[in-house]
Structure formats: C-alpha cells, structure tokens
Amino acid sequence: HLKALTEQAYYAEQTKAAAPIKVLGSFMAVVMAIGASFAVMNTMYAAVARRSREIGILRVLGFRPGSILLSFLTESLLLALVGGVVGCLLALPIHGLSTGTTNFRTFSEVSFAFRITPDLLLGGLAFSLVMGGLGGFLPARLASRQPMIETLREG
C-alpha cells in the first residue's frame, strides 16, 4: 500500500524512528550523572575526613558552621566546574561528525550530525555545577557539623 506524505510529515515519521536512540542517550546521561554525583560525594567525604583537624582549628578560630559549609561546597563546585570544562573540551572534536542509522520500518537511512552549540556547552557546564552541588552538599554539611573538640582530638 502506498501513501503520499508531505515533506514535513515524512521527516516527522523519520524522527519518530530515531526516538529510541534519544531515549537510550537520555538514560545513559542520567546514569552517568548519578555516577558523577557519587564520585563528587566520595571525593568530598575524603577531603572532609582528611582535613578534620583543620576544620576543628577553623571552628576554634571562630568560623561559623555556615562558613565551613560554604567553603566545602565552593570546593565541590570548583571541582565540578573543572570537570565540566574538561567534558566540554572532550566533546568538541565530535562537532560536525555525521553518522546514520537505518529506519527498519521504511528501510531508509536516517542520518544525523552532532552539533556542539554554545547553548549546549553552557547547559553542560550548568549541569555539572548542579551535580557538583548535589554531590558536595552532604559532605559539606558533615564538615560544618563536626564538634570542635572531637575534630581536634582525632586530627
């Protein structure tokens, strides 16, 4: 059976065929983001444990818990920013790369090209900062709530 389609309808149908690729890519991005967030959290917990004596000294010197929380959260965000910049730099070489897949319903080739736009790069940096903030908040909170005497004794 043969049917006539407008050009717009034809491309809309071809786009539907690529939907599983988009779903798979989104799923992989979420899994990797969760992994990155746990990596940030692990790094920051190690930093808090390694610097418990310094945290105690800061508390004795009069630093408030909020200041300590902010300093560790800032460190986490800076690490995330560095990771985001490195990720953006690693993504740049695929800009303009074209590839394709076969639409098995119509047996036609669906091709697409990777376009790395400034908005995409800024979105990636923002996303890395959000993941760094989420991953760094709990360790920063732990650092800010450590009792002064115990941290000085342990360090």
Image: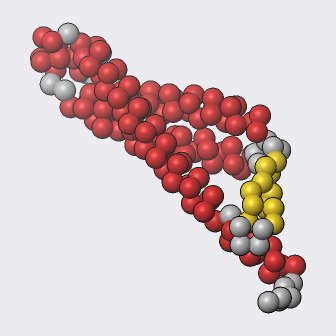
Estimate the x, y position of residue 41 in percent, counting from the top left: 36, 33
Q: Nearer the viewer, residue 112 or 83?
A: 112
131 left or right, relative to 87: left
Above/below status of 82 relative to 56: below
Which corner quadrant of the image does residue 50 belong to?
top left
Give the camera-side residue of 27 and 140. Answer: 27
Specify whether residue 133 is in view: no
Query: Viewed as shown, does residue 18 lie left or right of 131?
Result: right
Give 62 or 112, whichever is nearer the viewer. Answer: 112
Q: Which colour scheme is used?
A: secondary structure
- Quarter that holds the C terminus: top left
- How many marks the image carries: the answer is 0
Q: Position of residue 12 (x, y in %)?
A: 75, 75
Question: Where in the figure is residue 37, as x and y percent of width and height?
Answer: 42, 39
In the picture, which quadrant includes the N terminus?
A: bottom right
Residue shown at 70% from the left, 37% from the top:
91
Q: Can residue 41 be seen in this view?
A: yes
Query: Residue at the spot x=74%, y=57% of the render?
Result: 101
Picture layout, residue 18 above or below residue 39: below
Q: Is residue 57 above or below residue 20?
A: above
Q: What is the quadrant of residue 66 in the picture?
A: top left
Residue at the spot x=12%, y=17% of the render? 149
Q: Which residue is drawn at 82% across and 48% down?
A: 98
Would you identify the image quadrant in which residue 106 lies?
Answer: bottom right
Is residue 14 left or right of 65 when viewed as pictured?
right
Query: Between 124 and 99, which is closer to the camera in this rendering?
Result: 99
Q: In the orientation shown, which residue stands out farthest toward the front?
A: 1
Q: In this view, does 50 lie to the left or right of 9?
A: left
Q: Where is residue 65 in the image (x, y as percent from the top left)?
A: 26, 31
